[in-house]
Image (cartoon, grey):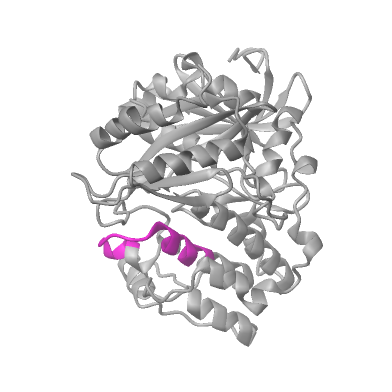
Amino acid sequence: MDNKSGILMQRYEIGRLLGQGAFAKVYYARSYQTGQSVAIKVIDKEKVMRIGNAAQIIREISIMRLARHPNIIFLYEVLATKTKIYFVMEYAKGGELFSKVAKGKLQEDVARKYFQQLINAVDFCHSRAVYHRDLKPENILLDENENLKVSDFGLSALAESKRLDGLLHTTCGTPAYVSPEVINRKGYDGAKADVWSCGVILYVLLAGYLPFYDSNLMEMYRKIVKAKFKFPSWFQPEVRKLLTRILDPNPESRITIARIKENAWFRRGISMKSRTYNAESSITNSSDRNVAASFQHENGGALEEIPRITNLNAFDIISLSDGFDVSRLFEEPCSKARFFSWKPASVIVSTLEEIAKRSKQKLSKKDEGLFKFEAAKEGRNGILSIEAEIFGVAPASHMVEVRKTSGDTSEYYNLLDEVLRPGLQEIVWT
């Protein structure tokens, strides 16, 4: 960036500082080409390398590319120099949700609207095996239309972060919002821990203060572990019952997101019209509009026999090039494989099904265009699990991205070379 002129790579005009953390600052900026407002997160590469957080930055980029949803901050592109990394993101004009709560409790209808959008965003993350792990009002932003936008995926985890017991073990998050199982340090389910944090947020929105608080941190943790809290007098019976089920200290009996979505209090005010999301109207960068197709299933679109897939925008395609691979900035190995095909998505899916049948792998559909291969027997490092995701590159061509999510790496490469590559040979464009 030219410090004198505040211009980044002749593409963005950098403006005021919006916020800062340990090794990053966020600025308001404007695109020279379109005049669009964006937020740019500037990360000091030297500081990141010094404290060993390179893998975290790579993971954050991967997660933000996976988590494309109307209630999640959108990552437009990633730029880099020798000393800095720049995340060019959607600008949320409304600021932090925390600033609203700091003024006092919200009206029930307003709080419910934010909670509905939060649950939809978190549910979408979980469908992509992404666990936020630091949900709180400070990490939730609002756009100019008062729509909620989840941000800051710096502490998030992917399914591959799980150990052999299928649980996450890194203790992280903000003390007042972490779940009892995270505090107990015996391993936890990322999805269930996120649900707890959503419950704390709902309580804060409706009460104007935290359910668990004490100036002594250990005493606060004791209250969290025992779920020791009281409801204000103005809380209605329905929301008390829902919060009791969310703030259940036992993760096994805690209510799931699917059940929350069925709850009568939660569903109030949701109409078919509001459930149908117009992705094109909210994505201001025209090159990113084709991402809208990935939102249809989440927001009530009709199911089709031919699988709907995510279309790659210009940034996605460029980032596939070795020269634009941000992971190379940190010299990290990549365990992904990509194949291009001119065949329709339905033919690719049929080929994947045939490969799974021949190799005695279990194939299941996780989402539209996203499939999971799972070995029938346990290997050297647990059960080998692989995801295959189909992306649209152009009207007549597709890309298949294969990645390991669990199991032994050498077994993954053997399956890739001996089963997947030969099996896809007939439909792959080389």
Measured along the vertical axis of the image, is residue 134 above or below residue 422?
below
Rendered location of residue 107, percent (x, y): 72, 71
123 within the magenta span = no
Rendered location of residue 186, percent (x, y): 25, 62
Q: Is residue 240 visible?
A: yes
Query: Hey, which quadrant is residue 356 in on the image?
Result: top left
Horizontal placement of 367 versus 280: left or right?
left
Q: Residue at x 55, y 29 (%)?
A: 399
Camera-side residue of 331 and 430: 430
Q: Residue at x 65, y 73 (%)?
A: 266
Q: Which range is magenta?
A: 182-198
Q: Residue at x 61, y 43 (%)?
A: 68
Outermost left residue: 380
Quarter of the image with the N terminus is: top right
Rendered location of residue 105, percent (x, y): 66, 70
Measured along the vertical axis of the image, is residue 309 above or below residue 313?
below
Q: How many marks?
A: 0
Query: Hey, which quadrant is residue 258 in on the image?
Result: bottom right
Measured along the vertical axis of the image, is residue 184 above or below residue 169?
below
Q: Is residue 209 visible?
A: no
186 within the magenta span = yes
Rendered location of residue 348, percent (x, y): 54, 36
Q: Residue at x 37, y 73 (%)?
A: 252
Q: Main secondary structure of the magenta part?
A: helix
